């Protein structure tokens, strides 16, 4: 799933999920049918419109069941539908194994809507080799309630061809915001309406990216204060971010005249060869290639500037709190076999390549979730089977800033922060300090709703 759609859907879920009671029932019926098999109902089955992904899923179910004749898998379409999730919880229709976005486990755990799998996860092979910050998303108070299966983190996408024309080394992309500013100046100086750097500022995307900027310089959006959450951006870090953005927009004039942009606008600018850089996750690159008839060789991806932290998102699976021990064991066996199986990495990469899918980016089927020997082996396999120049993304892969998830009630917070980004990008006399103070006053009541 595209990182932006994934994050947006998660926000809708949070909005609709508020106030739910801890009601969830396993729908799989008896733990073991008369034939002795355990049946698990799982979601994550792609819709018919995603023919390739659907075929892969069906093939995996058949192979898993053949290898595990005591388990029947009943797949359901969909990943996480915010329009139906609350009703499924209340109505006892929640699957035995269900998909969750990174933004949701904390609330799900607090409402006791997931099984405690602490004792069971000890039997999941290679669980300890998964990146700790990703495992922590599904854990609380020393207990484990789910496992991560894929993730993304924000980086800097750049146009290698424009870098070369501007006298910049495309193999040495910017590492700091100061270097981004300098590169943007040189790209804009090429003329012909070239834009050095672009940023979003509406549809909650401005707030989303302000959060990414804050994390990159070591700041945050919200923090715990006792038993409540409070805003934490009206400070030196917040002013640093907005002053830098304001200087690029109005002093350097490297961000173009057109503002109030959203992701589609910026992708179009990059796809048309008019834009030098923007913040994005790796899955933006296939979009640029496929929608704009581009070439992977034209694009680079590096770590987020300054790299003191980066915004992460992703997905994983949790288990129905009413599931029996047999269903929990069977569910975890399915998850670990399909999503967390190092022995299947090469086979998955090979079949994706044979069917014309891009190989080389840090996205599924080889998600960047592993550490140690497994991570090294996965990197070697991706390089050997790559269908694109993986060196263009090496600096992104090699840099590991601390990952931070989105703030609580993210969409409501982002709506407020959109106004801050819009003001800085459209008003040359925008008062940064006042904007942050006003936003803080509006965000604190939003955070006060977090339980």
Image (cartoon, grey):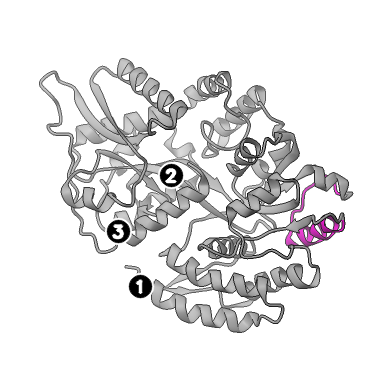
Of residues 142 and 347, the one drawn nearer to the viewer in this rendering: 347
Picture disc at residue 315: 2
Q: Are dots 1 and 3 in contact, CB under 8 Å?
A: no
Instruction: Say whether residue 328 is visible.
Output: yes
Question: Residue 84 in the image: x percent, y percent?
Answer: 27, 49
Instruction: Say whether residue 170 is visible.
Output: no
Q: Tell us which disc is closer to us: 2 or 1.
A: 2
Please give the residue where the numbered disc 1 appears in the rendered image. 227
Please give the residue where the numbered disc 3 appears in the rendered image. 17
Label 1 to label 3: alpha-carbon separation: 21 Å
Picture disc at residue 180: none
Specify start and end residues of the magenta stretch as a single range. 168-189
162 relative position to 74: left or right: right
Label 2 to label 1: alpha-carbon separation: 27 Å
Q: Earlier in the sequence, mark 1 or mark 3?
A: 3
143 relative position to 236: left or right: left
Q: What residue is drawn where x is 70% and y is 48%?
A: 270
Q: Are dots 2 and 3 in contact, CB under 8 Å?
A: no
Magenta includes 180?
A: yes
Q: What residue is drawn where x is 37% and y is 51%?
A: 139
Q: What residue is drawn where x is 59% and y is 78%?
A: 235
């Amino acid at each position: 799933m595209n990182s932006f759609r994934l994050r947006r859907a998660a926000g809708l879920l949070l909005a609709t999920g508020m106030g739910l009671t801890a009601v969830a029932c396993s729908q799989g019926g008896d733990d073991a049918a008369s034939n002795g098999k355990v049946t698990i109902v799982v979601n994550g089955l792609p819709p018919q419109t995603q023919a390739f992904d659907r075929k892969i899923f069906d093939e995996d179910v058949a192979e898993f069941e053949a290898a595990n004749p005591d388990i029947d898998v009943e797949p359901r379409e969909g990943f996480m539908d915010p329009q139906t999730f609350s009703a499924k919880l209340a109505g006892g229709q929640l699957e035995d194994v269900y998909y969750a976005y990174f933004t949701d486990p904390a609330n799900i755990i607090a409402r006791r809507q997931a099984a405690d799998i602490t004792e069971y996860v000890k039997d999941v092979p290679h669980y300890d080799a998964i990146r700790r910050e990703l495992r922590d998303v599904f854990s609380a108070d020393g207990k484990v309630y789910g496992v991560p299966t894929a993730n993304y983190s924000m980086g800097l996408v750049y146009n290698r061809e424009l870098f070369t024309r501007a006298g910049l080394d495309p193999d040495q992309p910017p590492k700091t915001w100061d270097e981004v500013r300098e590169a943007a100046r040189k790209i804009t100086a090429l003329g012909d309406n070239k834009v050095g750097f672009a940023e979003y500022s509406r549809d909650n995307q401005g707030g989303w990216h302000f959060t990414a900027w804050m994390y990159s310089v070591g700041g945050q959006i919200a923090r715990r204060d006792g038993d409540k959450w409070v805003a934490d951006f009206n400070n030196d870090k917040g002013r640093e971010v907005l002053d830098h953005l304001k200087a690029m927009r109005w002093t350097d004039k490297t961000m173009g005249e057109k503002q109030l942009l959203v992701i589609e606008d910026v992708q179009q600018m990059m796809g048309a060869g008019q834009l030098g850089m923007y913040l994005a996750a790796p899955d933006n690159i296939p979009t640029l290639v496929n929608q704009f008839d581009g070439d992977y060789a034209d694009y680079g991806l590096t770590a987020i500037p300054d790299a003191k932290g980066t915004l992460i998102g992703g997905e994983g699976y949790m288990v129905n709190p009413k599931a029996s021990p047999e269903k929990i064991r069977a569910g975890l066996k399915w998850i670990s076999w399909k999503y967390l199986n190092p022995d299947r990495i090469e086979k998955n990469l090979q079949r994706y390549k044979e069917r014309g899918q891009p190989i080389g980016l840090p996205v599924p089927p080889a998600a960047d979730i592993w550490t140690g020997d497994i991570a090294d082996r996965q990197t070697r396999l991706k390089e050997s089977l790559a269908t694109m120049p993986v060196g263009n993304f090496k600096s992104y892969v090699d840099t590991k800033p601390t990952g931070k998830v989105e703030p609580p009630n993210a969409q409501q917070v982002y709506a407020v922060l959109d106004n801050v980004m819009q003001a800085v990008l459209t008003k040359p006399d925008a008062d940064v300090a006042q904007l942050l103070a006003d936003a803080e006053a509006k965000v604190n009541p939003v955070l006060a709703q977090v339980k």
